[in-house]
Amino acid sequence: MSMVPEPGILAAFEAAKGFMPADEGLALYAAAAEAGRLGLPLLEIGTYCGRSTILLADAARTAGVTALTVDHHRGSEEQQPGWDYHDPETVAPELGLMDTLPIFRRTLHRAGLEDHVVALVGRSPRIAALWAAPLALVFIDGGHTDEHATADYEGWAPHVAEGGLLVIHDVFPDPVDEFTGQAPHRIHQRALASGAFTDVSATGSLRVLRRTGAGI
Ligand code: SAH
Ligand code: MG
């Protein structure tokens, strides 16, 4: 099984609107391809317009599993009008609200990956509260406040199967480098301190950990 996406998938990823640099995308793909061997689904928190979802979807397709992606599609705090990461194209004019779901659907369709993805539209903690199935990989890339990052960790990390991977984006251990706060760094530290996860790799702000213990 290839740990690198085919050129067409990489091109679709690079063309998609979103927030993941190529080197981190390759690290995410490799983690997803490896975790997929467990034969369990891969789950992302933070779909946005589907940039990283393309990679999880292609890794899921290759492994014969399903990629799940969670988002309310109304954007994070820093993506709202007037804030640094706002993109006016993500606003539905008739609502005056962000709605990234149609953009995500088009992105995934154009990449030919629709059949490999189930989109879960809603707030992450509400979906996590209903969840029971073990997961091969959980990728946390949702809200960057402590409230959101902590809820994502507490809601989803327990569902990572033994030997599966927890991936966290936007981890900035040095406050000088941070651009959206250090909540992801704090959940990374918490995952390590729990004894349930062991560091596997770091690429840019992307951290990959393996579930090696029980209690979280
Ligand atoms: N993974 C994407 C970027 C995600 S941006 C990429 O590769 O480009 C973060 C996303 O998290 C936003 O779309 C926002 O709507 C979503 N989000 C933030 N808090 C959330 C929450 N509590 N529940 C569900 N989605 C949330
Ligand atoms: Mg991110």
Image: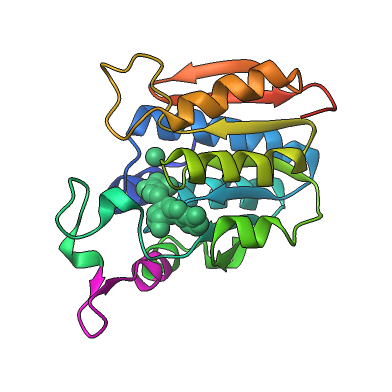
Percent x, y of residue 214: 85, 27
Determine the image quadrant of residue 1: top right
In depth, the one of 38 and 207 nearer the eye is: 207
Q: Is-magenta flag for residue 126?
A: no
| Residue at 37% in and 73% down | 102
Which portion, as a residue range, is magenta?
Answer: 91-105
In the rendered view, does 176 fall on the left or right side of 117? left
Residue 119, relative to residue 1: is it above or below?
below
**Residue 14 in sight from this viewpoint:** yes
Percent x, y of residue 21: 32, 34
Determine the image quadrant of residue 3: top right
Q: Is-magenta flag for residue 99?
A: yes
Residue furthest front as drawn: 147
In the rendered view, does 180 fall on the left or right side of 26? left
Percent x, y of residue 41: 71, 50
| Residue at 40% in and 70% down | 101
Residue 32, relative to residue 95: is it above or below?
above
| Residue at 36% in and 59% down | 49
| Residue at 45% in and 33% down | 169
In depth, the one of 34 and 166 nearer the eye is: 166
Residue furthest right as drawn: 214
**Residue 47 in sight from this viewpoint:** no
